[in-house]
């Protein structure tokens, strides 16, 4: 097999963010590149390395020298995280199909054909789901709890968005806006942009069965990320709906508290000037008005910038065929077609 020329545009670009833990990257490359090649597609690999993991670069350079296909190594200048690494890799991807992989084995490479088939069937993105799960029951319990909260707040039906394996069309990758912990919620962000996303079950890799435990800070961070996605997907285009409902609820609660204090004063002759109940109600009403005002400011900002914000995707444009003009003979007379 010949080495592919750097100028040849590959059909598939595989982005591997090396930002936290990683396994044998050479074996990861060999197994997935072999599987993609067996499907008759040319491929390039882009390894995006976080600044604190520069020690892995020599091994990647050796892989680059030995690789049959094209391998690109991008080293970030600092510790910017997985969202930044994926963004950087997808910006540099040249293939019409972009694949993202974790830097360690999560799924068996033989399942990649099903994801490509899902794109051929009309989906814009295929999300890997490790199924059946063969890791510890604690891992499975954590995953079920996380996804049940996610499904309840976003109304989506995904079961394994933590899996790093995703296959998407390049135009989808170009539309994703990733930052912070948003790399975990790529399917939701794609759905919010109007793309079609499906979930593809893939066999879980044997090396992905280790017990994983995170600190309380990590769990709290993921909960906050879920709240962020909930707001971004539901209320970014209409912030007044969120802040208006919240502000109205706070104002109504404060009004009810003050009404109770007033009734106690009028009918039961209880003093209110030195009662915390009156102050609590007043503060709640003020907070409600401020929250409502925040929603109004958000609506004004959205209105001003609405013409510059494209929140839709055109899937297809169908035009009426133009009828052929009748032929004109040498004498200038129209001829029947």
Image: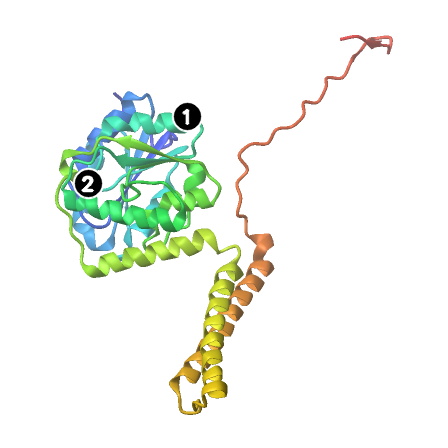
Q: Quadrant of the N terminus?
A: top left
Quarter of the image for residue 69 reads top left
Q: Quadrant of the C terminus?
A: top right
Could you say which disc has been placed on residue 221 in the image?
Answer: none
Question: Residue at (20%, 55%) from the top-left corner?
Answer: 52
- Camera-near label (1 vs 2) is 1
Q: Is residue 65 left or right of residue 170?
A: left
Point out residue 206 in the picture as x, y percentages from the top left corner: 14, 34
Indicate which disc, 1 or 2, sits on the residue closer to the N terminus.
2
Q: Secondary structure at mark 1?
A: helix
Question: What number is the disc on residue 104?
Answer: 2
Front position in the image: 221 or 141: 141
Q: To which residue does mark 1 refer?
A: 120
Percent x, y of residue 177: 41, 50
- Residue pushed farthest front? 267
Which residue is at 40% across, 82% downward?
277
In the rendering, at what x and y percent does residue 31 appear? 20, 29
Percent coordinates x, y for residue 163 in the rendering: 27, 41
Q: CA distance from mark 1 to mark 2?
A: 27 Å
Q: Quadrant of residue 79?
A: bottom left
Q: Vertically, is 314 above or below 295?
A: above
Is label 2 in a helix, a strand or a loop?
Answer: loop
The relative height of residue 123 versus residue 325 in the rendered view (above or below) is below
Structure colour scheme? rainbow
For the residue carrying disc 1, how many other residues have a C-alpha within 10 Å: few (<14), some (14-19), or many (20+)?
Answer: few
Q: Is residue 288 visible?
A: yes
Q: Within 10 Å of the Cα at label 2, are there few (<14), some (14-19), or many (20+) other Cα atoms?
A: many
The answer to whether 165 is drawn above or below residue 297 in the figure is: above
Does residue 80 appear in the picture of this structure?
Answer: no
């Amino acid at each position: 097999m010949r080495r592919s020329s750097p100028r040849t545009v590959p059909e598939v670009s595989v982005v591997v963010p090396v930002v936290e833990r990683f396994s044998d990257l050479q074996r990861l490359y060999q197994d997935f590149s072999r599987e993609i090649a067996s499907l008759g597609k040319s491929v390039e690999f882009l390894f995006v390395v976080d600044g604190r993991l520069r020690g892995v670069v020599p091994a990647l350079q050796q892989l680059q020298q030995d690789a049959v296909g094209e391998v690109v190594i991008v080293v970030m200048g600092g510790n910017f995280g997985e969202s930044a690494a994926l963004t950087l890799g997808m910006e540099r991807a040249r293939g019409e199909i972009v694949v993202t992989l974790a830097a360690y084995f999560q799924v068996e490479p033989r399942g990649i054909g099903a994801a490509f088939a899902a794109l051929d069937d009309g989906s814009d993105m295929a999300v890997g789901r490790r199924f059946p799960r063969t890791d510890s029951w604690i891992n499975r319990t954590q995953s079920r709890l996380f996804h049940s909260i996610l499904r309840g707040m976003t109304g989506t039906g995904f079961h394994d968005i933590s899996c790093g394996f995703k296959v998407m069309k390049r135009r989808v990758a170009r539309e994703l806006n990733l930052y912070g912990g948003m790399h975990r919620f790529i399917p939701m962000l794609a759905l919010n942009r109007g793309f079609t996303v499906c979930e593809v079950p893939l066999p879980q890799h044997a090396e992905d069965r280790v017990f994983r435990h995170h600190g309380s800070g990590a769990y709290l961070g993921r909960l906050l990320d879920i709240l962020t996605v909930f707001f971004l997907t539901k209320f970014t285009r209409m912030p007044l709906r969120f802040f208006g409902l919240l502000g109205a609820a706070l104002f109504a609660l404060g009004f009810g508290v003050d009404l109770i204090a007033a009734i106690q004063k009028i009918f039961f002759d209880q003093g209110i000037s030195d009662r915390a109940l009156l102050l609590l109600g007043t503060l709640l009403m003020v907070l409600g008005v401020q929250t409502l005002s925040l929603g109004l400011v958000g609506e004004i900002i959205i209105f001003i910038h609405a013409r510059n914000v494209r929140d839709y995707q055109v899937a297809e444009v169908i035009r009426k065929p133009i009828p052929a003009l009748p032929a004109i003979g040498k004498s200038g007379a129209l001829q029947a077609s």
